[in-house]
Image (cartoon, rainbow, N blue to C red):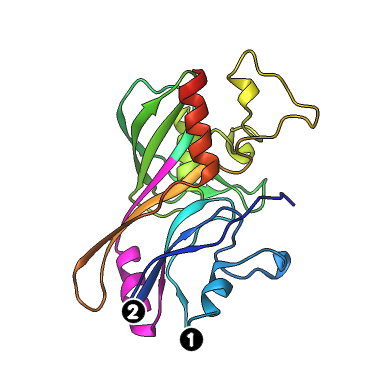
Amino acid sequence: MKSIKVGIPEVLFENASFVVINKPPGYLSIPDRQASGRPCVVSFLKRTMESVFVVHRLDFETSGIMLFAKTSDSHAQLCKQFEGREVKKIYWALVIGRPTQDKVELNFPIAEDLARPGKMRVHEKGKAAHSTVEVLERFGRHSLVAITLHTGRTHQARLHCKHWGFPLLVDPDYGGQDAFYISSIKRSYKESAEGERPVISRVSLHARSLRFTDPDSGELQFFEADLPKDMNVSIEKMRQFH
């Protein structure tokens, strides 16, 4: 079981009907009996809230913005927005390679990978999946991209980047590396006596922003979640040594 240094979820906004948080990597979205020792966002929120309803989820290693409902009515309305594709979700990812196009539309259907339980694959008989990818910054051999998910398939951002030809920097399940080290981009890097530690050792994906409608007021809401330290440091080192 992979070990990830974890922080504490940050509450970005809260009112009577919903709460928005910035989830650190290494947190489950909901409790899992098979991983009972891992911290969980729902359990964290229930320490101070009477009721918490899950609207959507992020993978264990993925950081970023999450939305939870606080009442059954707001939960039903927010879930309806997600199902109706009325919510705008943007992820930031570090990928391997330098795309020549600044913006691309990716339409690759996604299905379960029967040979690998729990994993997905691009397959012509899968469910329709649509992503828009924009290049934010290019480095020597890597890039920072923004991924807008128009559909919400499991592992969609990771699979679409892989099938596009630019897998996530760290994502051993879908073509990326096990971890990112400074020595891979700095020629004169000297390893310490304790050995080199990875800059980032989890899936290099962050849920950057979320736009939805307040179920009570009907007003449009927009929230952003700052990048965690491991992705920020990776970007800084890529700028410095590329």
- Specify the amino acid type for callout 1: Glu
Magenta residue check for 73: yes
Q: Are marks 1 and 2 in contact (CB under 8 Å)?
A: no
- Specify the amino acid type for callout 2: Ser
The answer to whether 4 is drawn above or below residue 192 in the figure is below
Which residue carries the number 1 mark? 50
> Tag 2 or tag 1, which sits nearer the N-term?
2
Q: As rendered, which of 10 and 215 lies closer to the eye?
A: 10
Q: Quadrant of residue 201?
A: top right
Give the image location of residue 123, x and y in percent. Answer: 50, 42
91 sits to left or right of 186: left
Circle 1 SS class: loop
**Magenta residue span:** 67-92
Label 1, label 2: how far apart the Cα atoms are: 12 Å
* Residue at 39% from the left image edge and 35% from the top image edge: 145
Which label belongs to residue 17?
Answer: 2
Is residue 80 among the parts visible in the rendering? yes
* Residue at 59% from the left image edge and 18% from the top image edge: 186
